[in-house]
Every structure is written in structure tokens, then in C-alpha cells.
Amino acid sequence: MDILRFATAGSVDDGKSTLIGRLLYDSKTVFEDQIDAVERVSKERGDENVNLALLTDGLRAEREQGITIDVAYRYFASPKRKFIIADTPGHIQYTRNMVTGASTADLALILVDARKGLVEQSRRHAFLATLLQVPHLVLVVNKMDLVDFSQEVFNNIHEEFTAFATKLRVRDLEVIPVSALRGDNVVDRSEHMPWYDGPSLLHHLEHVHVASDRNLIDARFPVQYVVRPISDEYHDYRGYAGQIAGGVLKKGDDVMVLPSGFTSRIASVEVAGKEVDQAFPPMSVTIRLEDEIDISRGDMICRPHNQPTVTQDIDAMICWMDETATFQVGKKYAIKHTTRMARTIAKDLQYRLDVNTLHRDEEATSLALNEIGRVRLRTTVPLLCDDYGQNRTTGGFVLIDEGTNRTVAAGMIHNQ
């Protein structure tokens, strides 16, 4: 059974947490004691209905304010598929949390309140989802019960968002009208909207095709750990453990190790000590080679005629995540890219991007919390990278402040 990772986003009070609560509740993946606790808290707060948002808003500050602050991860399954949900915040000051939650998502749910239509945050989150190359986008028009399930209201929002999406790189878009509070079109089709002939939200999530979204062409295997068991039985065993970042690797394949450039052939591919026929992303495996080559953490195994870019000069879009410091040209940072650590210096800030208008401020000299910009970096050692649009794993990185050891930025490489 495959796994779908999806992130929810949208403006404040659009009903993200309620929608996830409804998905969990109607798909019968919530324990009775959790339901009892939510019902009790709902009564204490004087809510008319059971407040399903309480199933996901776990922080006390979230419950007290009725908002989502942190990225809440939830897991559930239907007979057809397993799901990992990242419930991301809608507030503008938590843009970095939205970036974190969406960075590994296969699909993004953008919620819109049917009464308010598209707002600034809706556009912001749609843009961020496309910036992070999330392959599938679903616009969920929520609270349809508060506009009398009006087809006209839904069509207007549908048309407005479709027009906005033409400015972005949206590969796959679905628009679904729902009422998370009442359950219309969430798990089951709604009787209140006979004019809508599309799937329910859960049906779409179960059937959206994500297998082809992974890069199965460019073989990329960043080495995380060299396995050398200390025992007489395995005295000559040398394996290279890590997670497949792209392509398909199998026994007998010709491979090259970067940055050394030495070539060899795969002797075996193992998972938990057992040999497998082939490995593909995102499998974690141990690879053994026929030749003894000096390989260590941070090296990459790839195909001899299909190599990543080896460069010390990086052009990238970054989202700044630190509250105290700002991104400054000339400052030095640590950079973590796949399994490789290096140091880097900020050579240039080409522009700061206004996420709401998509305007480029080329006069900007710094990036503050939650701001996004195009930068140029120079690293102390070459990085083995691809363009982020080609491979999200080998195209992504984080910047770390060496003084505080805080992660200060997330970046997407765009060297091409």
C-alpha cells in the first residue's frame, strides 16, 4: 500500500484543522477516548457542534487562540492508501512552518472560505506550494453550507483561482466544494450539491497518481554511512547505507562515485540485511560494490553518464527562517545538502520576492523572517546537486548559523 504525503494550507479560520478532523473522524481512524475528550472540551467551550479541529490543534496556545501555530503531523489510512498529513499554519508570521510542511508533500490542499473567496494568504500558499514543486494542488472551497451550497459562488472562486494559477507552474489542479463542519464532499459525496459531479475529497486523495512524480531517471544515492561490521563472519563486508534520492539501482549496474570519479559495479542492494532486486526513491538501502573504493559520508553514487552538477557556486531561492538574524551578503553559514556538510559565504542577494504580488525588489539588501529571495552562494567544497525542479532532494538544502547552530534558511537550487 503506497503513502500519500499532503500538506494543508490556507488563510486563518478557513477550516484546515476542522477538515482534517472530519477526515479522521469520518474515516473512523480516531480512538473513542479521543472523541470523548474532544466532545467534552467542545461542551466546556460552549461550541454548538463537536469541534473536530481539536483533534489536530495539539498545542495549548493553539487551542486557546483557535489557530494553528506549529506543523501538526497526523497519520491515517483508508483501505486504498496510507496518508501523512502536515497541517500547516495560515498566519503570515508562520510562513516558514508552511515551507517546512510542504517541502516533502506530494499534494497540497489550499483551503478557501466560500464566504470570503480568494484572499492574500490563499495566493501566498498556492505560490509557496508551486515554489516548492508540490506536484498536485487541490483547491478546497470550504464552508459551502454558509453560502447555501451556491454553485455561482463556487464557480466564481474556481474561475478566479484558475486565472491566478496560470501565472504559476501548476501541474495538476482539482477544485472541490466541501463543508468540513457537516462532512459534505469530504469522505462521501454531498446530496446538497447535485450540480457538482466531481469526486469527494477522500476519493481524490485515494486515487491521485503520485508514483510518476518521483525522478526515476537520474540515479542519485547520497552516502549516509559506511557499514563495516566488527565480526569475523563479515570481516570483508563494506556497504554504503543511505536513502535513494532518484533513479532505480539494481545489482550489476555500472556506477560512478563522486567527487572522486571512480567507477565500479553494484554487487548487491540490501534492505535490513536481505538482498532486493532493485531500489528506488525513497527506499533506505545498503549498497555493496564489486571494487574497494574510498567512499565516505557525503559522497554520491550515480551513473557514469548521468551525473549531478558538481559546483561550488549556487544560485538558489531561499526562505529565511530566523527571528533574530537576517540574511546578509558577505556573511558565512554552514550548509547541509543531502548528506554533505560544508561552509558557505553569501555572495549576492539578487532580489527579494513579494509573495503576494510576485514583485521582485532588486534593491533589497537583506532578508528577514519569512521573506523569500534569490541568492548566490559560494561553498568551501563542491556540492553534488541537481536543479530543484529536477530533483527535490538533491536540489534542496538548509543554511545553519554556526554561532547558534540554528537552522536559518531553507533553499532550492536553480542553477540552470
Image: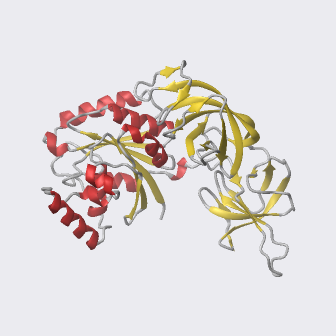
Decide: is 336 above or below 282. Answer: above
Report the side of 161 relative to 292 (left or right): left
- Residue 379, image quadrant: top right
Name the residue nearer the viewer: 26 or 341. Answer: 341
Q: Residue at x 66, y 51 (%)?
A: 247
Determine the residue positioned at 64% across, 52% down. 245
User: Which residue is at the far bottom?
Assistant: 232
* 18 up-or-down from 364: above or below: below
- Residue 212 location (% of width, % of height): 54, 49
Screen quadrant of the C terminus: top right
Q: Is residue 389 visible?
A: no
**Direction top: furthest residue:** 363
The coloring applied to the image is: secondary structure
Q: Position of residue 412 (x, y in %)?
A: 58, 38
Q: Quadrant of residue 26?
A: bottom left
Name which residue lies at 81% across and 71% down: 237
- Count of numbered marks: 0
Residue 241, x across and y down, in percent? 70, 63
User: Residue at left 67%, top 43%?
Assistant: 334
Q: Can I make out residue 322 in this image?
A: yes
Q: Position of residue 9 (x, y in %)?
A: 37, 44
Q: Quick check: 303 above or below 359?
A: below
Q: Between residue 1 and residue 53, name the one nearer to us.
A: 53
